[in-house]
């Protein structure tokens, strides 16, 4: 399994203000679904931050997202190790397959792969 990118998720009700603030550091909006907006560096597109008001299909908002090349393998490993699955593996309408898992410090991680 290979990690493709890691994105911190900032829970905020101030999306516009966040876009402007992180724009001062060189980030530009690359995705906006209304409930989540992703900002990226034009010079390094894998350097990203997501700002979210909440999650569309899950009961909690994840603290970070980790994109992997094989989300099914990641899910199997987490289940085998007894990790707490917070949101089950599922295909989402916006083109990702994902699940949420809680890390040892209590952070919720959105593990995903693009379809």
Image: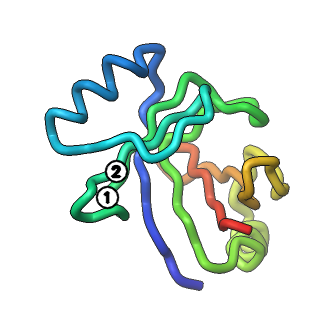
Kindly check if marks 1 and 2 are in contact, taking CB atoms under 8 A apart as contact. Answer: yes
Q: Nearer the viewer, residue 68 or 16?
A: 16
Q: Nearer the viewer, residue 73 or 36?
A: 36
Question: What residue sits 76% from the left and 61% below the top?
Answer: 97
Mark-to-mark CA distance, 1 and 2: 6 Å
Percent x, y of residue 11: 47, 27
Looking at the rendered structure, which numbered label has been put on residue 104? none
Percent x, y of residue 45: 34, 62
Assess disc 1: are there few (<14), some (14-19) or many (≥20) residues with their C-alpha within 10 Å of its C-alpha. some
Query: Which quadrant is the C terminus positioned in?
Result: bottom right
Percent x, y of residue 19: 33, 28
Question: What residue sits 74% from the left and 64% below the top?
Answer: 82
Residue holding disc 1: 47
Percent x, y of residue 61: 60, 33
Q: Secondary structure at mark 1?
A: loop
Q: Secondary structure at mark 2?
A: strand
Q: Earlier in the sequence, mark 1 or mark 2?
A: 2
Residue holding disc 2: 40
């Amino acid at each position: 399994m290979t990690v493709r990118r890691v994105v911190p998720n900032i829970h905020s009700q101030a999306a516009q203000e966040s876009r402007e603030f992180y724009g001062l550091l060189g980030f530009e909006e690359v995705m906006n679904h209304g409930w989540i907006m992703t900002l990226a560096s034009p010079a390094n597109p894998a350097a990203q931050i997501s700002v979210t008001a909440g999650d569309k299909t899950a009961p909690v908002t994840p603290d970070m997202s980790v994109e992997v090349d094989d989300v099914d393998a990641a899910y199997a490993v987490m289940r085998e190790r007894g990790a707490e699955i917070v949101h089950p593996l599922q295909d989402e309408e916006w083109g990702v397959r994902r699940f949420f898992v809680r890390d040892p410090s209590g952070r919720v991680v959105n593990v995903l792969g693009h379809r």
